[in-house]
Each structure stands twice: as structure tokens, then as C-alpha cells.
Image (spheres, rainbow, N blue to C red):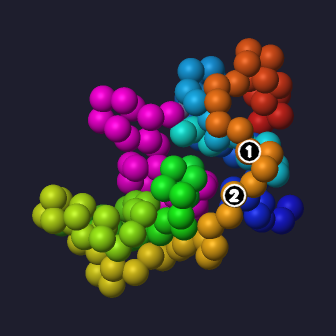
Amino acid sequence: MSLCKECYSKHNRITPLNGVRECLENHEQYICGSCGRCICIQKDEKRNLQRWNFPFQSLETAILYLRTADVTEEKSCGIYCLTNNNGRESYKIFSSDEALDLYLKKNKNKRCSDKVPVYRFSAYQTFTGTQIRKLTTTEVEQYLTEIS
Ligand SMILES: [Zn+2]
Ligand SMILES: [Zn+2]
């Protein structure tokens, strides 16, 4: 399997990661026009946050959601490695170094040592086959059989 040039994943049915059925049935998905992978892009209207706004435990997982950040911000976003006071590492996506700085100012318990993204997909591109919408019931069932 090769890396999907649109959504940066080798595995075209790897997401959603948690609460798969609930996510597919209830949340708006980024449907990759190239490989068909669904990525949760649902916005929490109250807090104006999407899945990619939250910290990830690993770089690999952050990369799985990077495409939804790029599409939302219409640019190549970066994944940064953050360390908390206990030395625990997490990965978080920001649209720019400035956005990272703003976050660090508000979250004094977090540090980012070199303030350089550990991962960024070079050039932002749009693709013609992309859809952002909720799946139909039939599509959910089909996708679920393809995951397993
Ligand atoms: Zn979801
Ligand atoms: Zn893809």
C-alpha cells in the first residue's frame, strides 16, 4: 500500500479510530476522493472545535487527522510535539507557528522545545472528488464491513 496523496495515510479504512459506528452515523466526515477513507470533521459548535484540534497520543494518529486540519484551514498545517510538566509528550496540530505560540501562552503547563513542526505535508492541494458530509445508512454499513 502506498501513501494516499490526498489524505496522507497508507490505510484507507483506518479511521474513525474510536466509537466507529457512532462517529460514522452521527458525525460529518471528510470522505477522501482518492482512497475513500472517512475522517471525522464534525465541529463541536459550542466550542468551535474539531477532532484535529485535540491533542493526540502519537504522531501516527495525528497524521491520520491532519488532512481535516489542512482542509479546514486551507493550508498545510503542522504537527507539533508538546511536553507537559510531567514530561509527558503529546502531538497537536496548529495552522501556524503563531497559533502554537498563542496556545502556549494560554497553557503554561505545556512546552514545545524547538517550536518546529515534527510533521507537515509539504504543499496544500485540493482534490476534485472530495466530499464533506454525513454518510447515508447504506454507506455506513458498507464502510463498516470494509474496516474489519
Ligand atoms: Zn466523529
Ligand atoms: Zn485518501
Give the side of residue 118 with respect to residue 140, left or right: left
Residue drawn at (39%, 69%) of the image: 96
The N terminus lies in quadrant: bottom right
Evaluate whether residue 33 shows in this view. no
Q: Quadrant of residue 105?
A: bottom left
> For this rendering, which residue is in front, 109 or 131?
131
Q: Which residues are magenta?
A: 42-67
The quadrant holding residue 27 is top right
Q: Residue at x 53, y 73 (%)?
A: 119
> Label 1 amino acid?
Thr
Write down the residue under mark 2.
126
Please indicate whether residue 28 sits to the left or right of residue 47 in the image. right
Residue occupying image coordinates x 64% and y 25%:
134
Write down the residue under mark 1: 130
Q: Residue drawn at (80%, 45%), measured in percent from left and top?
A: 129
- Sort mark 1 into few (<14), some (14-19) or many (20+) by Cα contacts within 10 Å: some
**CB atoms of marks 2 and 1 within 8 Å:** yes
